[in-house]
């Protein structure tokens, strides 16, 4: 079972009592059982060595200094969902030729993660990066570059010359700041084709080329560098995508924040596409994301990352005990928190050190202060407030201030421009 923040309150506890000298197929039985539990999806297990005891043969075994070679009792304990426990028992029971196996109901009061999965900082970046990269050339027009971004939904692209050398990076932010593009890619992608065509026609009138507006020099990673170094560089420069180049500076791939998060969680990210209802839409409640991506104020870093990956969005709402929204956490906040302090080495805090970064809570990580709107707020008024305060996200609440859903610029613009 993949550890998450929703382990069932009613779970099962497996207890296995064996002897220290018991073996299974050439290895200690306790080690073989642990491997079997792990292979069958059990979240975790603990082996306890007894100081004394006796079993079916009524012979007392002790850990006294003169009797260390005796067969001391071992207890293996694991707690998981009823389904996982039943599955694991089917595999374990035949292995215990002499001993005791029990199964009992337990109530899980609290289940938290002490650590994230350690980021494999030494993992070659080539095993993580995307090998097929969409690129731009410096002589492309702004209209051509923007059209390619719209077609691929990629908002940051390497700019390369004829020899594949990376010259710079072009992002939608560059196009907004230095060209005539009026909105971010995530918003533009929601516009109707007629509006997109009109904007492209305007862009075709500008003499600007990609080389005129790209960010240069590009911040890159070398093909021989480990993932930890690349991730630290992304955090330091606050960039979302990092081109990977060979020793001659030629492009070979790209690594993104999502790639880093996948390695921390050991899972694939999920993308949830929500389509607002069609027809006349007037209030924020009608267009909000109905599945609330939220975490409690005391959530640890592992729980936060799990929620971020599960939601498929780039923001999480932090709520208090009464389900009132009190802050927001972005994917960039999370990536920055899995970077180590330089004095500890690259991502050293995630190697099981004395002060792991997973001690960070949502309260410490969040950006406090949330723009909220009651469910019946008109869309136009919500748009005015978001623009006036320069907010990308708005939390929809009920009359008691409790969280109902989430609205971002994309979905708001889509609703305002449709029907």
Image (cartoon, helix red, strand yellow):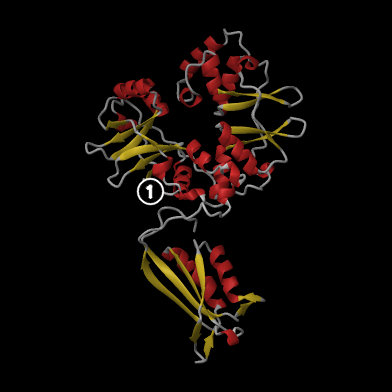
Residue 313 lies, in percent from the top left, at: 45, 37
Which residue is the extreme one toward the bottom? Answer: 58
Which residue, given by chain and number where applicable, does mark 1 sit on? Answer: 298
Q: Residues within 10 Å of mark 1 (few under 14, many from 20)?
A: some
SS under mark 1 = loop
Looking at the image, residue 359 lies above or below residue 210: below
Q: Residue at x 56, y 36 (%)?
A: 235
Task: Say which residue appears at 39% left-offset and 23% top-offset.
Answer: 390
Relative to residue 217, is residue 353 drawn left or right? left
Q: Is residue 134 left or right of residue 409?
A: right
Q: Is residue 344 visible?
A: yes
In this rendering, the count of numbered labels is: 1
Seen in the image, is 131 located left or right of residue 40?
A: right
Q: Tell me the quarter of the picture where residue 105 sits.
A: bottom left
Q: Residue furthest front?
A: 343
Vertical arrangement, residue 143 with respect to residue 186, above or below = above
The picture places residue 283, in percent across and down from the top left corner, at 28, 28
Residue positioned 48% across, 16% down in the render? 182
Q: Is residue 267 visible?
A: no
Residue 191, horizontal then vertical, whole percent: 45, 22
Q: Residue at x 74, y 27 (%)?
A: 164
Q: Position of residue 54 (x, y in %)?
A: 49, 87
Report the residue that reaches farthest toward the left. 399
**Camera-nearest residue between 100 and 92:** 100
Quadrant, the C terminus: top left
């Amino acid at each position: 079972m993949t550890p998450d923040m929703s382990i069932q309150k009613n779970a099962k506890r497996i207890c296995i009592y064996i002897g220290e000298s018991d073996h299974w197929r050439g290895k200690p039985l306790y080690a073989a059982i642990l491997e079997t539990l792990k292979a069958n999806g059990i979240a975790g297990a603990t082996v306890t060595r007894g100081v004394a005891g006796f079993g079916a043969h009524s012979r007392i075994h002790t850990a006294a200094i003169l009797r260390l070679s005796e067969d001391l009792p071992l207890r293996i304990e694991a707690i998981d969902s009823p389904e996982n426990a039943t599955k694991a028992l089917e595999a374990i029971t035949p292995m215990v030729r002499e001993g005791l196996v029990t199964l009992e109901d337990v109530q899980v009061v609290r289940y938290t993660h002490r650590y994230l999965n350690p980021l494999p900082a030494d993992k070659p970046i080539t095993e993580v990066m995307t090998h097929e990269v969409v690129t731009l050339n410096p002589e492309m027009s702004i209209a051509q570059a923007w059209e390619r971004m719209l077609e691929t939904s990629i908002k940051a692209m390497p700019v390369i010359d004829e020899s594949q050398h990376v010259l710079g990076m072009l992002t939608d932010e560059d196009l907004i700041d230095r060209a005539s593009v009026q909105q971010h890619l995530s918003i533009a992608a929601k516009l109707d084709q007629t509006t997109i065509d009109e904007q492209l026609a305007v862009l075709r009138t500008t003499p600007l080329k990609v080389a005129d507006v790209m960010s240069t020099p590009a911040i890159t990673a070398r093909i021989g560098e480990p993932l930890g170094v690349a991730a630290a560089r992304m955090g330091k420069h606050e960039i979302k995508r990092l081109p990977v180049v060979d020793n001659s500076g030629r492009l070979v791939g790209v690594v993104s924040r999502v790639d880093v998060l996948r390695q921390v969680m050991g899972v694939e990210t999920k993308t949830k596409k929500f389509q607002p209802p069609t027809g006349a839409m007037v209030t924020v409640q009608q267009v909000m994301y109905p599945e609330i991506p939220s975490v409690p104020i005391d959530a640890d870093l592992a729980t936060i990352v799990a929620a971020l990956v599960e939601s498929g969005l780039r923001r999480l709402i932090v709520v208090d005990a009464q389900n009132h929204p009190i802050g927001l956490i972005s994917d960039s906040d999370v990536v920055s928190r899995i970077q180590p302090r330089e004095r500890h080495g690259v991502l050293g805090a995630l190697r099981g050190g004395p002060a792991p970064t997973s001690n960070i809570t949502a309260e410490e990580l969040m950006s406090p202060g949330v723009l909220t709107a009651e469910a019946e707020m008109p869309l136009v008024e919500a748009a005015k407030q978001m623009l006036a305060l320069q907010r990308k996200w708005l939390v929809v609440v009920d009359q008691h201030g409790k969280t109902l859903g989430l609205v971002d610029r994309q979905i708001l613009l889509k609703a305002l421009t449709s029907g």
